[in-house]
Amino acid sequence: MRIAKFLPFFFLIPALFVIFFAMIYPMALVFLSSFFNVSIDLKYQFVGLANFINMFSDSQFLQSLTNSIVFVGGSVVCHCGFGLLLAILLTGNIKFREFYRTVALIPWFLSDVIIGTCFIILFTQYGTVNDLLFGLFKIRISWLQSTELTIYIVTLANVWKATSLYMNVDSSGIASISSEVLESAELDGTNSIQKFRYITAPLIKPFILLTLIISAVGTFNYYGLIYIMTYGGPIGSTTVPSFYMFREALEYRMIGYASAIGVFIFATNMTVLTVLRKFGATLA
Amino acid sequence: MKRFDSHSFLVLWTLFTIIPLFTLVVCSLTGSFNISNIGGLKASFDRFVVVIQESGYSYVNSLIAAITAIAINLVVCPLAGYAFSRYNFRGKLWFSYLIWITYALPLISGFIGIFIMFKTLDMLNNLFSLALEYAATCIAVNTWLAIGYFDSIPRALEEAAFLDGCSRLRVLFSIMIPLSTPVLVSMATYTFFMSWNEFILASILISSKSSFTFPVALMYTSTAGISYGGGVVYGIVAAGSVIGILPIVIMSLFFRKYLVVGLTRGAVKA
């Protein structure tokens, strides 16, 4: 009988063990290391807040933040905008609905490396896009070697990758609206824009906020495509904070400094989550 | 008129989705970056042969990592799910928070910690450590799936078994687990997709060639370069990508209905 009382805890132990060992402990290690100067053979030397102070006088890090504004801003606008548009267009009995949905979902199932390769091939100097431009206007643009343009190409690839996810979230929101509400609105003679403005939009507001959270936080943390397509270049113009952290740690072995950036990323995430929570968003 | 408008955007979006993939397949078959003169290109499977010779093992590694992650999850999550679904115990709410928090936790900020930890343990370049991380990223969603499913199984079934003299564990393993095959398949599918495609963690934890997973191997091919036919590396990477897509296509054909449940839930993770 005594054992039966503890049985649920025994059931939980394996899950908690994996979570602790694989997530909580490393996270704590990052918080700890951020106050230290960590050498290659993992010798710790306490430096207080120096890593954090360095961070805000490091021009490369500050540049990564401004790059992030373009990358995250562009991605969030397109993810949430096109996601919502697709979700709305795909409600009701539209023809080929399943086909459109299935095709739109494909990119979400692909590895970053595959997506990156697709877009490198498309936008390379003698790729399809440039060939088309050459045929029309006799110009070729160095999409992936330009300090101004490249970040937009990476953003485009990111939009290609994940928009269908936000479509899915919004779709489940729209599906949760009872059809009676919409029908009665139709009887009252609303047109489709009014119907969206006064019925659908207010009712799926929590879902739209959810897409905003996921897209903002997810894109801010994400650097898979950047690693593959540009490796942060040319001249750091596509480096975002998470990628900068990765390079500092694994290339330059500045583990303490990289940990401080990790803590910064963590804090940013929590801030965004709290702020958007104030507007009534919840993590589903 | 209205119908036409919505279709025209949907058709545009479909083209936008398909064209990069089409280019990828063309490039893998012909080595050409260009699809505008597709008629004049010669297709061959040479690149696929090169990829399989050079980095065929990496697909096996990816499979090993994914299957290990699935195995860990299929043991750990139904147990936790059963505890949450059937028991009231002290601190239940806090334990559920602890599991849920891993879903919202930005794992990326812990990557350096993961690296340090496995370096100290001398477990870098180890597929098991990679699989452990993959398993951990899926635990929250999979436990949630398990709780939801167990809640839908009537308690009367278990009570009948208790009356017949079964123990709790016996009930779990001979009644609950067999009944919940669909959710176990969902969990396995979700975990497979999360781990098969994963690139960032693999690139941090794995640096020796023999334990590359396929995304890392492809990345290695495109930067360090195995050249074929005058250095047309991207043709080879494209062929490798197409091979990497195949298991996904197969999985989604067979497990279509189990798939969508988990994937929309696992999104916050970077």
Image (cartoon, coloured by chain):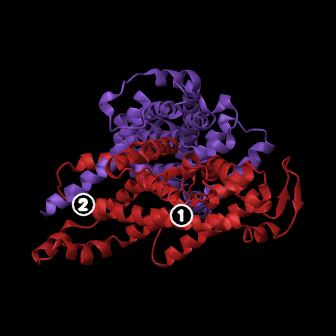
Determine the secondary structure under disc 1.
helix
Estimate the x, y position of residue A39 in percent, counting from the top left: 85, 52
User: How many discs appear?
Assistant: 2
Mark 1 or mark 2, which has the lower sequence index? 2
Q: Which mark is residue B97?
A: none
Estimate the x, y position of residue A263 in percent, counting from the top left: 70, 64
| Nearer-the-camera pick, A274 or B149 | A274
For the point 25% across and 78% down, which residue is it? A198
Quadrant assignment for the C terminus of chain A: bottom left
Q: Which chain is purple?
A: B
Q: Is residue B181 left or right of residue A181?
A: right
Q: Is residue A189 in view from this perspective?
A: yes
For label 2, the residue is: A89
Q: Label 2 amino acid? A: Leu
For the point 58% across and 24% down, which residue is it? B54
Q: Quadrant of residue B6?
A: bottom left
Q: Which mark is residue A217?
A: 1
User: How would you rate the neighbour count of disc 2 (Cα within 10 Å): few for under 14, some for 14-19, many for 20 or more?
Assistant: some
For the point 34% across and 44% down, which residue is it? B19
Q: Chain of mark 1?
A: A
Q: Label 1 amino acid? A: Val
User: How would you rate the neighbour count of disc 1 (Cα within 10 Å): few for under 14, some for 14-19, many for 20 or more?
Assistant: many
Q: Which chain is red?
A: A
* Same chain assignment for discs 1 and 2: yes
| Nearer-the-camera pick, B3 or B30 | B30
- Whether pointer 1 and pointer 2 mark residues with C-beta atoms closer than 8 Å, the reply is no
For the point 18% across and 61% down, which residue is it? B5
Q: Is residue A203 above or below residue A155?
A: below
Q: CA distance from mark 1 to mark 2?
A: 26 Å
| Nearer-the-camera pick, A40 or A280 | A40
Q: Quadrant of residue A167?
A: bottom left
